[in-house]
């Protein structure tokens, strides 16, 4: 039987419950139900017209063949200029690798750095796929519980408490999925220094960096040249389905990453790369900043609204488009609660189950990457649902 030949590493890859709930929501929609989607982390905005026009022009010009595995030079230069203009970090284009989405960037980084059996420290909660990239190369995600007192983020003190002889590095995200929280520059600098003193590596996922609200955004690259940074055109640039991202690495490992990229991917999409050049035009950047302001407006509506409904939001998110909310007033089983909210209220949210054991039972992730009209309707539905079925009591399993 074919299943008997499957690699044992698959046992270390858990199902992605976010996508399972998305399938449930799609089934309900096919039955005629109206569902408000606050589950999957995807902007409701799509690429601006100037970007779409650039893609059409690239196709009309026949720019449809393989590119360099590292990305077209013009796009690498544009990304370098973006770091200088937006974050005051001077990064040579030669350190930038354009990839088939941030997922490919993380895959390349883990392929280059993760040895079998190596432990990579991550905060709990964290984005589940990051753990699975490590597992794919037979490393082990070492989850460190990080609660509201730490803004759900790793600290230097926690790192030093949990580092062992088997640890080889850390994988962080700032701002984070699922919590929307960032690591302060001083704290991140201490983490990087502590890892470096132990001869480890630091990878920082910055795909939500452009969606930072309460303080000027900074890149980890401003703190140390040896940090490996991941970014993407999916979130701030609203190009989720285009599958385009990048990573910035020390110059010395570029040849090794190029070798890996050539073998694993050949190259990123040529059309997506030429289109992405238009992302850095003044017209596109103005649109992205308007959309960022809209995300902030939504956050400032949904966080107090959820608190008024009885959810505990212990940390106000300062980035991305997620609220990580404690639902234990209503249920001791966040997974069951999320499914009942979907089935009865027609609002798709996701449980903490995906994001790590420390918050699995009591937290839900709620995305505000949808219109204000939808957010208001979702709050109305949740209010009715909670008032009629769960008047402040715990739902028993």
Image: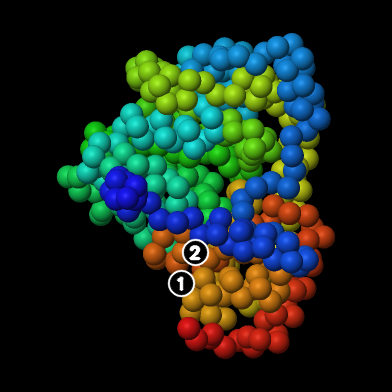
Q: Position of residue 74 (x, y in %)?
A: 61, 13
- Between 222 and 206, the residue placed more toward the observer is 206
Q: Residue 361: give its label.
A: 1
Residue under the image location 79 percent in, 23 percent down: 53
Which callout, 2 or 1, points at the residue further toward the start of the chain? 2
Q: Is residue 15 above or below residue 306?
A: above
Q: Residues within 10 Å of mark 1 (few under 14, many from 20)?
A: many
Residue under the image location 52 percent in, 72 percent down: 334
Q: Residues within 10 Å of mark 2 (few under 14, many from 20)?
A: many
- Between 64 and 272, the residue placed more toward the observer is 64
**In the structure shown, which secondary structural element does the residue marked by tag 2 occupy?**
helix
Residue 244, quarter of the rendered image: top right
Q: Position of residue 340 (x, y in %)?
A: 61, 75
Q: Position of residue 138 (x, y in %)?
A: 28, 42
Residue 282 visible in the picture: no
Q: Is residue 306 above or below residue 182?
A: below
């Amino acid at each position: 039987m074919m299943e008997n030949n499957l690699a044992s590493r698959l046992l270390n890859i858990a199902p992605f419950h976010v996508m399972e709930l998305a399938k449930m929501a799609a089934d309900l929609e096919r039955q005629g139900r109206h569902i408000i989607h606050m589950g999957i982390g995807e902007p409701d905005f799509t690429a601006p017209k100037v970007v779409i026009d650039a893609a059409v022009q690239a196709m009309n010009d026949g720019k449809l063949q393989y590119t360099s595995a590292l990305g077209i030079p013009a796009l690498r230069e544009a990304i370098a200029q973006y770091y200088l203009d937006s974050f005051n970090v001077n990064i040579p284009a030669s350190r930038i690798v354009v990839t088939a989405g941030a997922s490919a960037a993380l895959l390349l980084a883990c392929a280059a750095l993760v040895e079998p059996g190596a432990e990579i420290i991550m905060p709990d909660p964290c984005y589940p796929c990051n753990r699975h990239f490590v597992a794919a190369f037979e490393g082990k995600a070492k989850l460190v519980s990080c609660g509201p007192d730490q803004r759900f983020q790793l600290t230097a003190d926690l790192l030093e408490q949990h580092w062992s002889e088997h640890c080889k590095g850390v994988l962080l995200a700032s701002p984070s999925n699922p919590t929307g929280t960032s690591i302060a520059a001083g704290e991140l600098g201490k983490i990087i220094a502590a890892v470096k003193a132990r001869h480890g590596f630091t990878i920082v996922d910055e795909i939500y960096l452009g969606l930072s609200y309460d303080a000027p955004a900074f890149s980890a690259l401003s703190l140390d040249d040896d940090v490996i940074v991941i970014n993407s055109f999916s979130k701030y640039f609203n190009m989720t389905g285009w599958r385009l991202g990048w990573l910035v690495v020390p110059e010395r490992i570029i040849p090794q990453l190029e070798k890996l990229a050539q073998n694993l991917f050949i190259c990123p999409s040529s059309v997506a790369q030429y289109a992405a050049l238009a992302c850095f035009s003044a017209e596109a950047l103005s649109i992205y900043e308007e959309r960022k302001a809209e995300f902030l407006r939504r956050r400032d509506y949904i966080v107090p609204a959820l608190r008024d409904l009885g959810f505990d939001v212990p940390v106000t998110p300062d980035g991305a488009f997620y609220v990580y909310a404690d639902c234990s007033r209503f249920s001791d089983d966040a997974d069951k609660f999320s499914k009942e909210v979907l089935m009865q209220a027609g609002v798709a949210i996701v449980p903490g189950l995906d994001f790590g054991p420390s918050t699995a039972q009591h937290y839900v992730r709620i995305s505000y990457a949808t219109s204000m009209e939808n957010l208001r309707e979702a709050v109305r539905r949740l209010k009715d649902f909670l008032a009629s079925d769960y008047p402040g009591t715990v739902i028993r399993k």
